[in-house]
């Protein structure tokens, strides 16, 4: 069955009966030829083929979708995979067994989880996570069908790759260590100065200017002044009040599996990933805890 719709000056015919079925004498019946295609689609998807793979396969074999036209695409396949009518109800006879339908749905849900949107926590970590070797920012890579990974954006010799779960667990462990032993948040004499990403960038920019065949002294002077400014901002002059407040508040926290966005934003200044895989949490007073230890 079909109906016509108008799009501008064009009248288009669209299919109104679900693929795999016909209507005879007012009753929905199985279309034998199309039902075999439906079964094939579900089987291929359950075997691991992607929506696009299946659509391309049907197109290459000139399988008719509607009115002698081959109109297969991943959206068409997706709608088919999601339609529970294929397992049967009072109107539609059964084409797909509940077992096969549920298997396909489980696979689809798993793939959807891999492509979930970034959480607020992940977005924050993308801004504050740096390489312990070169100071460059770590970037998060997530391609279709693969697990996400974090790696240094500078392409330095540091080849420590981690995923979200490893990073979030390390931060959680570091927080729990601080909760159980707030004394670890006391500032050590050599931890008053914490180089920031901005300071590293300014240093690299100055080196780049100095290596130019024709040195611009005005640009170099400007870079030196800017570098001095950001380095000064790296110095923390803690009179003890910030550390005291931090210790008091941290000791009252309860962290389970993950540190939530609000806690992370309030107490974490930076996350540093070391070449050996160590993950350090730098708190707002510059106290640093690495992988559950001081």
Image: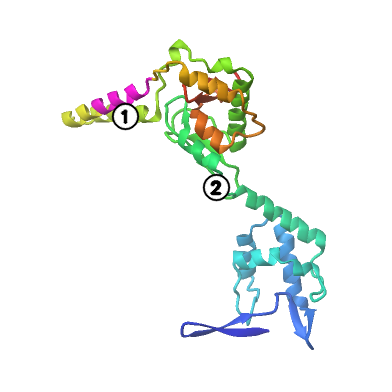
The image quadrant where one finds the N terminus is bottom right
- Residue to which mark 2 is pinned: 143
Where is residue 200? Give x, y as percent. 36, 27
Q: Quadrant of residue 65?
A: bottom right
The tag on residue 279 is none
Q: Please name the residue shown 21% across and 29% down the image.
A: 222
Please state the extent of the stretch shown in magenta in the rendering: 224-235
Residue reaching furthest to the bottom: 25
Is residue 223 or residue 31 the one in the foreground? 223
Whether residue 159 is visible: no
Where is residue 171? Give x, y as percent. 58, 29
Q: Please name the residue shown 51% across and 15% down the image.
A: 186
Q: Is-magenta flag for residue 227?
A: yes
Where is residue 63? Give x, y as percent. 65, 73
- Residue to which mark 1 is pinned: 202
Neighbor class of circle 2 (other Cα within 10 Å; few <14, some 14-19, many 20+) is few
Image height of 102 relative to 156, above or below:
below
Secondary structure mostly seen in the magenta stretch: helix
Which tag, 1 or 2, sits closer to the chain's start?
2
Q: Is-magenta flag for residue 280?
A: no
The image quadrant where one finds the C terminus is top right
Image height of 58 relative to 220, above or below:
below
């Amino acid at each position: 069955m079909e109906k016509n719709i108008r799009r501008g000056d064009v009248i288009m015919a669209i299919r109104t009966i679900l693929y795999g079925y016909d209507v005879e004498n007012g009753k929905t019946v199985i279309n034998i030829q199309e039902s075999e295609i439906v079964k094939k689609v579900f089987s291929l998807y359950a075997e691991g083929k992607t929506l696009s793979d299946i659509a391309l396969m049907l197109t290459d074999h000139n399988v008719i979708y509607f009115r002698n036209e081959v109109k297969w695409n991943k959206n068409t396949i997706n709608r088919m995979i999601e339609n529970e009518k294929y397992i049967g109800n009072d109107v539609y006879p059964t084409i797909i067994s509940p077992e096969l339908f549920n298997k396909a749905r489980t696979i689809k849900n798993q793939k959807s989880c891999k492509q979930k949107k970034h959480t607020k926590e992940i977005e924050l970590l993308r801004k504050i996570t740096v390489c312990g070797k070169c100071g460059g920012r770590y970037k998060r890579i997530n391609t279709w069908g693969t697990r996400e990974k974090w790696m240094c954006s500078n392409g330095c010799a540091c080849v420590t790759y981690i995923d979200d779960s490893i990073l979030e667990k390390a931060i959680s462990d570091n927080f729990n260590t601080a909760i159980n032993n707030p004394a670890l948040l006391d500032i050590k004499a050599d931890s008053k100065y914490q180089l920031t990403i901005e300071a590293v960038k300014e240093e690299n920019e100055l080196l780049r200017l100095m290596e130019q065949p024709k040195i611009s002294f005005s640009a170099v002077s400007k870079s030196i002044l800017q570098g001095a400014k950001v380095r000064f901002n790296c110095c923390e002059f803690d009179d003890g009040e910030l550390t005291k407040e931090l210790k008091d508040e941290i000791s009252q926290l309860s962290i389970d599996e993950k540190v939530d966005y609000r806690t992370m934003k309030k107490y974490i200044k930076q996350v540093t990933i070391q070449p050996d895989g160590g993950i350090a949490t730098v708190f707002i007073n510059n106290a640093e805890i690495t992988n559950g230890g001081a």
